[in-house]
């Protein structure tokens, strides 16, 4: 699987705020939003553009517009904290939603919500979720997209575990990953190490 690690100093500094156990929920949400801008910006680097001649107040020149804005798909709950910022960067993007809760014992994702366009053939899709741990939640989400014809999926994750990357690669799903860090491993409870804890709980409180 194609993995792009965004290790810009500004991204590293925001990631450190997210990792730090002393960070309160409001500061965590703000750092996640700022880091999402950086990850989304890098994810869009190769995006197709449409060229059109425009007039500046001084002369004619080439203008550039996004030819094919991606569908943005935050995975609830934690991905919700990335949705607005990605949407601000790509205002013409449509947004779909997937709701999943990982069973804390089996680590399997339990779906509770799905709102996606029926036909995704030929459309790029960005899945937004801060955490790629076992990869089960991401694989479930990508399968929903593939069932609708998607072939060009980008997972934007703050953190990824090697186990999750391997799982997605082995599943043969059409996905590339943009992340701020590939961490060391998963622990016995399925948490990323060193990680940042539970991104949903740290933004919104434990449920
Ligand atoms: C977390 C995280 C991912 C998933 C990652 O969500 O935001 O969606 O777990 O784990 P996996 O790669 O092993 O599937 P969680 O299920 O805790 O729900 P939440 O976002 O509502 O907190």
Image (cartoon, rainbow, N blue to C red):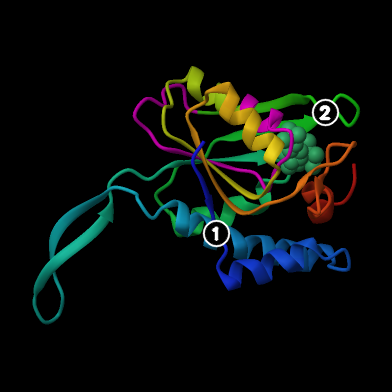
Look at the picture and state if 30 lies above or below 196.
below
Location of the C terminus (image quadrant): top right
Separation of marks 2 and 1 at Cα, in angstroms: 27 Å
Residue in the image at 82% along x and 66% along y: 20
Residue in the image at 46% along x and 20% along y: 148
Stretch of the chain drawn in magenta: 117-140
- Whole-percent x, y for residue 72 in the image: 51, 42
On whether ligand 1 comes within 8 Å of the CB at mark 2, the answer is yes
The residue wearing badge 2 is 107
Look at the picture and state if 170 lies above or below 23.
above
The residue wearing badge 1 is 6
User: Residue 152 is drawn in which quadrant?
Assistant: top left
Residue in the image at 82% along x and 62% along y: 25
Q: Is residue 6 left or right of residue 19?
A: left
Which numbered disc flags the more N-terminal residue, 2 or 1? 1
Q: Residue furthest left?
A: 60
- Whole-percent x, y for residue 205 in the image: 87, 51
Residue in the image at 29% along x and 47% along y: 48
Look at the picture and state if 16 lies above or below 191.
below
Task: Classify mark 2: residues with Cα within 10 Å, few (<14), some (14-19) or many (20+).
Answer: some
Q: Secondary structure at mark 2?
A: loop
Q: Secondary structure at mark 1?
A: loop
Task: Classify mark 1: residues with Cα within 10 Å, few (<14), some (14-19) or many (20+).
Answer: some
Ligand 1 quarter of the rendering: top right
User: Toward the viewer: 30 or 140?
Assistant: 140
């Amino acid at each position: 699987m194609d993995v792009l690690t965004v290790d810009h100093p500004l991204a590293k500094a925001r990631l450190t705020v997210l990792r730090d156990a002393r960070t309160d929920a409001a500061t965590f949400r703000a750092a996640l939003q700022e880091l999402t801008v950086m990850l989304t910006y890098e994810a869009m680097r190769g995006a197709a553009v449409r060229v059109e001649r425009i007039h500046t107040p001084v002369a004619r020149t080439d203008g550039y517009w996004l030819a094919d804005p991606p569908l943005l798909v935050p995975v609830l709950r934690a991905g919700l904290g990335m949705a607005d910022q990605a949407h601000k960067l790509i205002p013409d993007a449509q947004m779909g939603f997937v709701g999943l809760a990982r069973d804390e014992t089996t680590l399997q994702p339990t779906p509770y919500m799905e709102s996606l366009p029926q036909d995704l053939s030929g459309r790029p899709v960005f899945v937004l979720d801060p955490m790629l741990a076992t990869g089960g939640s991401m694989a479930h989400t990508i399968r929903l997209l593939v069932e609708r014809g998607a072939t060009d999926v980008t997972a934007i994750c703050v953190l990824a575990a090697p186990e999750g990357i391997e799982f997605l690669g082995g599943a043969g799903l059409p996905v590339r990953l943009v992340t701020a860090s590939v961490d060391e491993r998963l622990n016995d409870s399925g948490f990323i190490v060193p990680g940042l804890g539970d991104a949903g709980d740290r933004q919104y409180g434990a449920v």
